[in-house]
């Protein structure tokens, strides 16, 4: 395997975990890497940290720009990339040493356009021990779209290796108008153009959760509205809209409303926007029946029943058992 792999990281005020993230990338067992780090107008020590690593490792390309959001930053990284395959990494996450080698091996064995695993290894302070699982399955891009709409695959753009040619041939980019749901939309677009997707079982991407200071743990009205609007964008972008896909999208749309409502409840943000709170609550209850007939886990179906009975208590119960803790609104 001699393919070049482009790894793209958008950074904004990421000094707290950035060293750990970069270390996990430069120490990959597979060495033919192009590491593109876009500093999106950080005002902390992120740029200094990146420069230290860039001076030591010529594979690192630092791009400094004014703050314009993660979508624009990732798009710049994609445009500057020259690798055969592209991987997206979040600034506070960590890669197992075999991450690139593992995904590239799966792609090479199966001649697939995308390699992924259903879920990452979730952690906050301590990363669990990595265990290699050599099993995998091959599915079509359309099957992958449906699996993701049912949230059986992680919806974010990370934890995937994507053929660069697929992205450029189909002009796939992150939508800069979204500040929530943009990664979901990007992932769906990539999957639907893939002829073949290989799905491994090893959890090689370590996803940090639990820090209440991260954006995903705070109430932000624009992010919630963006996540909801991104679902409509996803539907418009779908190439195939047969009954299976439509039903899967309806579930995904309902699931997004539930996640947004969970944030408002977890952050005690009802008083911030009572109209939005009621909109989310009413939608999650009215459309909960979509979960009853969906091909999802028992846990997800129970989630549906809880929201059908009482959305507020459903959110309270779900949030209680989550690793991620929400930051209370002021």
Image: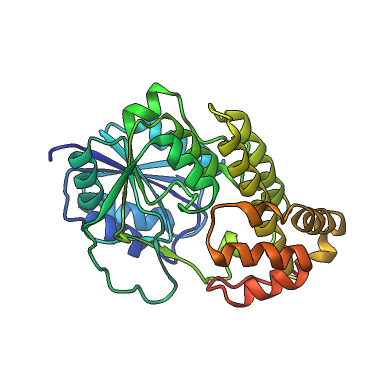
Q: Quadrant of residue 165?
A: top left
The chosen color scheme is rainbow
- As drawn, is 326 to the left or to the right of 278? left
- Count of numbered tags: 0
| x then y, percent, for residue 118 | 40, 54
Identify whether 266 is placed above or below 142: below
Please state which of residues 326 and 291 is positioned toward the viewer in this rendering.
Answer: 291
The residue sitting at 48% across, 54% down in the picture is: 152
| x then y, percent, for residue 298 | 55, 65
Quadrant into which the C terminus falls: bottom right
The residue sitting at 59% across, 46% down in the picture is: 181
Identify whether 5 is placed above or below 262: above
Question: Furthest-front residue in view?
Answer: 293
Question: Furthest-top residue in view?
Answer: 169
- As drawn, is 267 to the left or to the right of 273? left
The residue sitting at 22% across, 64% down in the picture is: 132
Please state which of residues 309 and 122 is positioned toward the viewer in this rendering.
Answer: 309
One can see residue 58 in this view: no
Q: Quadrant of residue 133?
A: bottom left
One can see residue 241 in this view: yes
| x then y, percent, for residue 198 | 31, 44
Quadrant into which the N terminus falls: top left
| x then y, percent, for residue 329 | 73, 69
Q: Quadrant of residue 63?
A: top left
- As drawn, is 104 to the left or to the right of 287? left
The residue sitting at 23% across, 46% down in the picture is: 106
Please state which of residues 315 and 110 is positioned toward the viewer in this rendering.
Answer: 110
Please state which of residues 268 and 9 is positioned toward the viewer in this rendering.
Answer: 268
Question: Furthest-left residue in view?
Answer: 1
């Amino acid at each position: 395997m001699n393919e070049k792999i482009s790894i793209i990281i958008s950074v904004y005020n990421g000094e707290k975990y950035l060293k750990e993230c970069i270390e996990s990338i430069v120490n990959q067992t597979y060495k033919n890497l192009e590491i593109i780090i876009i500093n999106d107008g950080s005002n902390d020590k992120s740029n200094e940290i990146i420069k230290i690593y860039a001076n030591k490792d010529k594979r690192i390309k630092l791009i400094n720009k004014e703050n314009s959001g993660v979508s624009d930053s990732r798009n710049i990284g994609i445009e500057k990339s020259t690798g055969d395959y592209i991987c997206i990494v979040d600034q506070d996450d960590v890669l197992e040493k075999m991450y690139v080698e593992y995904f590239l091996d799966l792609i090479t064995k199966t001649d697939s356009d995308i390699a992924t695993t259903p879920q990452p290894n979730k952690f906050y302070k301590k990363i669990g021990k990595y265990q290699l699982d050599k099993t995998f399955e091959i599915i079509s891009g359309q099957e992958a779209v449906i699996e993701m709409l049912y949230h059986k695959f992680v919806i974010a753009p990370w934890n995937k290796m994507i053929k660069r040619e697929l992205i450029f041939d189909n002009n796939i980019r992150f939508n800069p108008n979204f500040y929530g749901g943009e990664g979901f939309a990007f992932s769906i677009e990539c999957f639907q153009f893939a002829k073949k997707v290989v799905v491994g079982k090893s959890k090689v991407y370590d996803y940090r959760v639990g820090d209440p200071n991260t954006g995903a743990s705070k109430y932000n009205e624009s992010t919630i509205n963006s996540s909801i609007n991104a679902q409509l964008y996803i539907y418009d972008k779908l190439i195939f809209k047969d009954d299976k896909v439509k039903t899967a999208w309806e579930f995904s749309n309902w699931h997004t409303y539930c996640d947004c409502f969970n944030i408002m409840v977890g952050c005690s943000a009802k008083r911030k926007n009572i109209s939005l709170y009621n909109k989310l609550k009413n939608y999650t209850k009215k459309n909960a029946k979509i979960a009853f007939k969906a091909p999802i886990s028992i846990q997800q179906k129970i989630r549906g029943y809880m929201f059908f009975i009482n959305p507020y208590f459903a959110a309270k119960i779900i949030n209680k058992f989550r690793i991620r803790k929400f930051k209370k609104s002021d």
